[in-house]
Image (cartoon, helix red, strand yellow):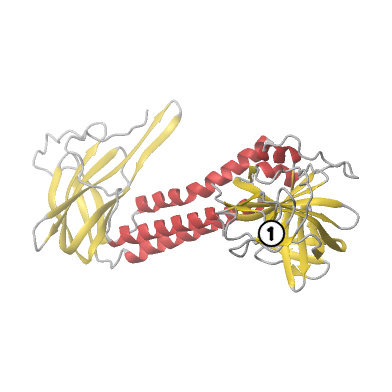
Amino acid sequence: MIAGRTLQCPSCGGSVRVHAVGYTVTVACQYCGSELDVAHPDVRLITEYHRDATRLSLPLGSRGMVFGTEYEAIGALERTDGDAAWTEYLLFNPYAGYRWLVDYDGEWTFGVMLVDRPDGDAETVTWRGARFTRDGAAQTIETTRVHGEFYWRAWAGDRVEAVAFERGDETLSGERTGDELTWTHLVPVPRRDIGQAFGRDDATPPRVSPSGGGVASRAVANFARMPASDERDLAAMLGLAFTTVAMILMVMAFLSGPVTRAYTRVQVPIGATREGLKIGTITVSRSWQFVTITADSENFTNRWVDLDYSLVNRATQQSIDAYGLVEFYAGRDSDGSWTEGSHHARTLVSHVPRGTYDVYVDASAHDWPNDPAPDASNPWGMSETTSVWIEARTGGVPWGNFWTMVVLLAAAPCMMLWWRLRNGDSE
Amino acid sequence: MTRRLFLFTAWCLVMLGGAVASTLTAWSPFADDEREQHSGPSGPSHK
């Protein structure tokens, strides 16, 4: 996955592999420790050493999955503040970029360089809505040895002024070199996870902290779940999905017009059919439009009304057909009373081309379970009817399309949320 | 912006574009076409 090139150390002749080609500026020879400048086509010797490479707890070139991304350890800095010493590993992924993994006496932290800087003063800073409090005084940190490759000119003897701000287990580390101030967000990670991720069972054993608490904490537990960036991603994705859903609804509502309407009331005979009833005339003025036909009936029970609509184009006499059904039932059983259906029906006719349409309906109503018997004493009398109010209009929101898009948009963030809650619950 | 967020943004734009296209062409797979000729009588499905 990670491409690279090999060059020859000018000092010892050893083969030195460069992993982040195009980004790497300096490389330390893994055999003699000499620092090489690879920013130029001809490799230059910066500082010549003749020493054995230090055995690192995380060998350079080893790869591991960290927070769902595979990184390769390409560089290491041995640093000290005068009292303590630690090692900072530079991780690289060609798509995700650079990350840091810090080994401080067996306590590991994972660091992400910040693009958005914290705001604040010397005592507190705020970053992405979270408040961090200063931890200790500013320190001078010196790099004592350099291994591997880096995207800047890394030297043994480099000094930076560093200050740390803490919030729970998280740390914001600011390092100043000259006029440049860089910030890194650090979260602790368990040693065992580092060992598993990079296939190293012999990672430095943890130092026992004065409090005895080690690094077991909420943030540590989060290592196996998701990093802070994932949580921000989730919030951003949910917000993005919500915004897109709102925009889709507006698009469907406003682009479906213009609207013309036709409206009528129909007396539908029970047990018979009335054919060719004209609802009215509507005009489709765009190339294609939806036509929505709604039917509302009187308050009947145990009855259904079949509605066969026809949109007849006045110019071509071609017909577009659609179907609607109003039905409502009620009853009582061992579980109590029940109802089913509605006195309202909505019919969506799609892809109706431009033109003027006469809207007709064939309507028939039926009682359930049987139609009423004819009145034998008055065979020519009017049969019982039920009233249905029908409105046809151009336009309308295609709710099936809308809810499908809502599901498709919500699927990814909901899966992430489910995964997060599932892993959180399992701990 | 992470790669995942970038991809999801692209997905949202695809959905929005789909909404515009389907509305302008008045296309929907959920339209109420003419009922089937052999559909039986209605009635409650309550058991």
Specify whether A289 is left or right of A198.
left
Q: Find disc 1 in the rendering and name its residue.
A: A36
Q: Position of residue A299 (x, y in %)?
A: 32, 47
Q: Position of residue A154 (x, y in %)?
A: 73, 61
**Mark 1 packing: few (<14 Cα in 10 Å), some, or many (20+)?**
many
Residue drawn at x 40%, y 64% is: A250
Is label 1 in a helix, a strand or a loop?
strand
Q: Residue furthest bottom?
A: A179
Residue drawn at x 28%, y 34% is: B43
Marked residue chain, label 1: A
- Residue A113, compared with residue A366, is above or below; it is below
Residue drawn at x 53%, y 44% is: A415
Q: Quadrant of residue A278?
A: bottom left
Q: Nearer the viewer, residue A230 or A115?
A: A115
Q: Amino acid at mark 1?
A: Leu
Specify whether A21 is left or right of A406.
right
User: Which quadrant holds the C terminus of chain A?
Assistant: top right
Q: Position of residue A133 (x, y in %)?
A: 81, 61
Q: Position of residue A205 (x, y in %)?
A: 81, 38
